[in-house]
Image (spheres, rainbow, N blue to C red):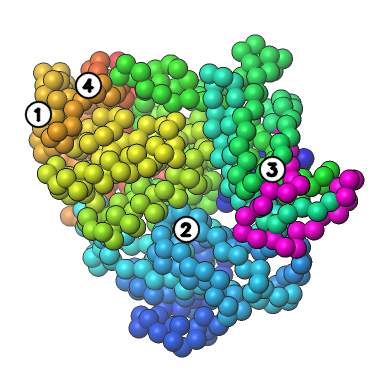
């Protein structure tokens, strides 16, 4: 069972196979401003002088095109050469493509996907042939505010804290050759109180036919879901190369669920290696689908044994209170916008956030490359996962948001670093939540729908502003003066928690009719200190500062004010780096520190 649980640049780190091919790089590219590409037959192939470097969008410098103007319809084309195997199926994965994506192989339509932030997969098998094959991808986007768009602008120019739009493929494109009977989904749930890992594996394919020696496997009658004949799930769990547990379970239907006790008192006197911010211990997991003694499919994965809970107004990590020192991270880069320029760039961000003395981050308005979550798992970085917002409340927006959010929760469920889901922020997409019952019910529905998939993590509804149902009470306040801030939150505690006092001069903490139920209180946005050259097109929150001394004085005063208030259990500073016209980062957009990171770390260590 030699499949690795990590391969550099592998896009799906919690379900790893050895047989894959990254398809990033040069693709033929064309604008289709009249939206006549299909009418002209471009789906079967097209001629163009333009070449784009996938996965960078045409708006970015690294794409090779660098055109920030709006083009709603675009096309990609690439040829691949392969020796087609009859016992394999060939799956094309797009980790992220914004927004409506259609895929053709050799002129054959193989599927479409609507969304921007989650993975979409397409079965190319029936359209492929041995030799040269042509993949054509058409993507349509718009300035619609009924589709989840996060911090992408919906007018022709940047404004406020909204930036250049992202159109088309913006995450890795890759393919893998998989067995006809194969793993399709994997969900891992740790239970530290009972020393168990719950494994839920979905198997797709046909039935197994094997003699008593397991020498004959015939999956030629593959279907969409396994019918439960003759297969078993074999697994091996290890830690740092030491085998902790092996197990085998008969597969009776497409979904196989089991819990495995992994306590090993020879490994550690406590039986478990716990995942936390100081010691982010990870177990390796290798799973096989077997027909008799023969392995049909094998995947590598990993998990962290950790627990998130809420008790007595505290967020608990592994049954102990954790004070969260977070930083807002929008994940934008100078030459590639939403797309990280490399895996190393993701690692650099995490390391520098740690260097600044934060133990976590709030990934703001973006579902990041899954390799980022892997490295947060490895390095012990806490993550709040936040959905990209729509900006109006319509039936279309409700449908678009719900469909995409649920897929994201399922895709990233097993990452131990994620300790909070944040579907809504500052009433974006629910602008009248304070008075509109339909919008209130929508946020409740998303809360409970998220809980139906994942009841192991807190869910925040309407981060920073008026909450309905929510496991945390989170407040946004960009007050500049630490003394004023402290006085506000000490003197008006009952009014803030009761939803009668405007904590940031414009918003109450609770929607009328909803009451405070003892949730932990976190200041989930503050600071945003602009440290800039004071150009007209740059901005941050409040008055800008001109030098490091002035910055550190203000940062220390407001941060220590927050830390001195007993009922506040954590904070999230705005933000990691500058983003285009927004200059309130602790680093520039090219990741150079604007202030001494050791001094920030010293302040973050406490009063």
**Image depth: mark 3 or mark 1 in front:** 3
Q: What secondary structure is the magenta-colored segment mainly?
A: loop
Q: Callout 3: helix, strand or loop? A: strand
Which residue position is annotated with label 1? Answer: 500
User: Left or right of 446: which side holds 287?
Assistant: right
> Which of the marked residues, 3 or 4, is nearer the chain's N terminus?
3
Question: Residue 315: x percent and y percent?
Answer: 37, 23
Residue 459 lies within the magenta run: no
Residues marked 2 and 1 touching at CB (< 8 Å): no
Which residue position is annotated with label 2? Answer: 96
Residues marked 2 and 4 touching at CB (< 8 Å): no
Q: Which quarter of the figure is the C terminus placed in?
A: top left
Question: Residue 270: x percent and y percent?
Answer: 61, 13
Q: Nearer the viewer, residue 346 or 592?
A: 346
- Circle 2 crowding by C-alpha within 10 Å: few under 14, some 14–19, many from 20: many
Which residue position is annotated with label 4? Answer: 561
């Amino acid at each position: 069972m030699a499949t690795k649980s990590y391969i550099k640049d592998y896009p799906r780190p919690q379900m790893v196979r050895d047989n894959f091919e990254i398809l990033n790089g040069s693709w033929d590219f064309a604008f289709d401003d009249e939206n006549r590409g299909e009418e002209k037959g471009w789906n079967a192939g097209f001629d163009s002088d333009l070449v784009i470097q996938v996965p960078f969008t045409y708006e970015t410098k690294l794409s090779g095109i660098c055109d920030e103007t709006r083009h709603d319809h675009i096309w990609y084309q690439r040829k691949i050469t392969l020796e087609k195997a009859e016992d394999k199926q060939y799956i094309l994965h797009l980790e992220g493509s914004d927004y409506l994506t259609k895929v053709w192989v050799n002129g054959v339509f193989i599927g479409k996907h609507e969304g921007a932030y989650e993975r979409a997969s397409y079965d190319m098998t029936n359209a492929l042939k041995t030799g040269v094959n042509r993949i054509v991808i058409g993507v349509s986007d718009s300035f619609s505010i009924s589709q989840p768009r996060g911090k992408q602008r919906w007018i022709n120019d940047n404004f406020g804290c909204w930036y250049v739009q992202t159109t088309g493929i913006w995450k890795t494109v890759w393919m893998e050759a998989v067995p006809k009977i194969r793993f399709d989904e994997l969900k891992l749930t740790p239970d530290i109180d009972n020393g168990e890992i719950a494994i839920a594996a979905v198997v797709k394919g046909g039935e197994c036919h094997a003699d008593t020696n397991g020498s004959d496997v015939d999956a030629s009658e593959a279907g969409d879901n396994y019918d439960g004949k003759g297969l078993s799930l074999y697994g091996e769990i290890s830690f740092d190369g030491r085998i902790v547990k092996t197990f085998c379970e008969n597969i009776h239907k497409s979904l196989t669920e089991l819990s495995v006790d992994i306590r090993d008192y020879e490994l550690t006197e406590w039986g478990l290696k716990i995942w936390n911010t100081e010691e982010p211990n990870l177990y390796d997991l290798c799973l096989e689908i077997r027909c008799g003694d023969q392995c049909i499919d094998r995947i590598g994965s990993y998990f962290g044994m950790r627990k998130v809970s809420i008790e007595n107004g505290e967020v608990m990590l592994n049954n102990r209170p954790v004070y969260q020192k977070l930083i807002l991270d929008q994940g934008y880069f100078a030459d590639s916008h939403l797309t990280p320029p490399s895996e190393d760039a993701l690692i650099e961000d995490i390391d520098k956030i740690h260097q600044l003395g934060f133990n976590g981050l709030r990934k703001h308005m973006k579902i990041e490359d899954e390799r980022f979550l892997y490295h947060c798992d490895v390095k012990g970085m806490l993550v709040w996962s936040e959905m990209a917002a729509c900006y109006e409340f319509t039936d279309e927006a409700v449908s678009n948001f719900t469909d995409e959010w649920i897929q994201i929760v399922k895709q990233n469920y097993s990452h131990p670093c994620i300790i909070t889901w944040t579907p809504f922020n500052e009433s974006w997409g629910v602008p009248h939540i304070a008075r509109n019952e339909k919008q209130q019910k929508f946020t409740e529905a998303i809360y409970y729908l998220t809980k139906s998939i994942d009841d192991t993590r807190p869910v925040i509804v309407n981060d920073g502003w008026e909450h309905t149902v929510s496991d945390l009470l989170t407040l946004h306040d960009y007050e500049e003066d630490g003394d004023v801030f402290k006085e506000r939150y000490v003197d008006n505690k009952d009014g803030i928690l009761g939803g009668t006092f405007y904590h940031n001069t414009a918003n109450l903490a609770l929607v009328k009719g909803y009451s405070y139920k003892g949730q932990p209180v976190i200041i989930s946005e503050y600071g945003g200190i602009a440290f800039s050259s004071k150009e007209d097109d740059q901005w941050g929150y409040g008055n800008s500062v001109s030098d490091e001394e002035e910055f550190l004085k203000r940062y220390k005063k407001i941060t220590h004010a927050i830390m001195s208030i007993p009922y506040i259990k954590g904070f999230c500073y705005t933000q990691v780096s500058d983003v285009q016209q927004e200059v309130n980062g602790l680093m520039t957009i090219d990741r150079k520190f604007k202030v001494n990171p050791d001094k920030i770390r010293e302040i973050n260590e406490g009063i």
